Amino acid sequence: MKARKLCLTLLLLGAASSALAATPQELVDKYTAEAATSAPGFRPSAERGQALFTKEWGVSAAMPACTACHTKDIRASGKHVKTGKVIEPLSPAVNAERFTSEKNVAKWFKRNCTEVVGRECTAAEKADFIQFVMQGGK
């Protein structure tokens, strides 16, 4: 009986964690749907995503743009300008773990957008950005 309860618990935990698992395309679809509620017909744009990524926002002298830590090449590792911590590549083509956890994506968008952009990013900006990295930064 105890083994059966343990198995059921493990199955439920697995189901709960997989509910947070995602693919980059699923996240683009989610943010696109959110954006479309205020902008009917919204379609994600890799070009807008790249512009968001490379724009110098002027909020922080140390982190004026996403590229300050992530570099201009989303296929390369970056390094946090303040902590020196290595940042794995943004491109899902190079880093298979990137954009596979809805919880982590939400956490990092909130933190990075606040630090670099000076506010939380919109659903449209998130969809555009993920569309950009899915296309390999091209």
Image (cartoon, helix red, strand yellow):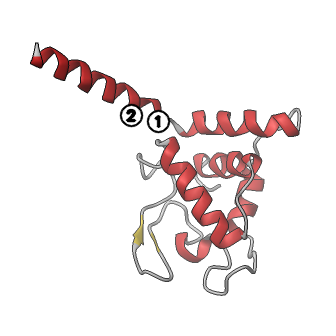
On screen, 30 above or below 53?
above
Instruction: Give whichever of 88, 14 is nearer the camera.
Output: 14
Q: Which residue type carries mark 1?
A: Leu
Q: To which quarter of the image does residue 42 belong?
A: top right
Q: Please tell me which residue is depicted at 66% across the width and 51% down the height of the picture.
A: 132
Taking the spot 73% from the left edge, 65% from the top edge, the residue there is 119
Kind of residue sitting beneath label 2 = Ser
- In the image, farthest residue toward the front: 1
Can residue 19 be spotted in the picture? yes
Is the N terminus in the top left, top right, bottom left or bottom right quadrant?
top left
The answer to whether the residues at label 2 and label 1 have Cβ atoms under 8 Å apart is yes
- Residue placed under numbered mark 1 in the picture: 20
Q: Residues within 10 Å of mark 1 (few under 14, many from 20)?
A: few
What percent of the width, then of the height, locates residue 60?
Answer: 67, 82
Give me the disc on residue 17.
Answer: 2
Q: Give x and y (percent) for residue 84.
A: 41, 80
Above-or-below relation of 105 to 67: above
Name the residue: 59% across, 77% down.
68
Residue count near mark 2 (Cα–Cα under 10 Å), binned few <14, some 14–19, many ≥20: few
- The C terminus: image quadrant: bottom right
Q: Secondary structure at mark 2?
A: helix
Q: Is residue 92 visible?
A: no
Q: Is residue 97 left or right of residue 99?
A: left
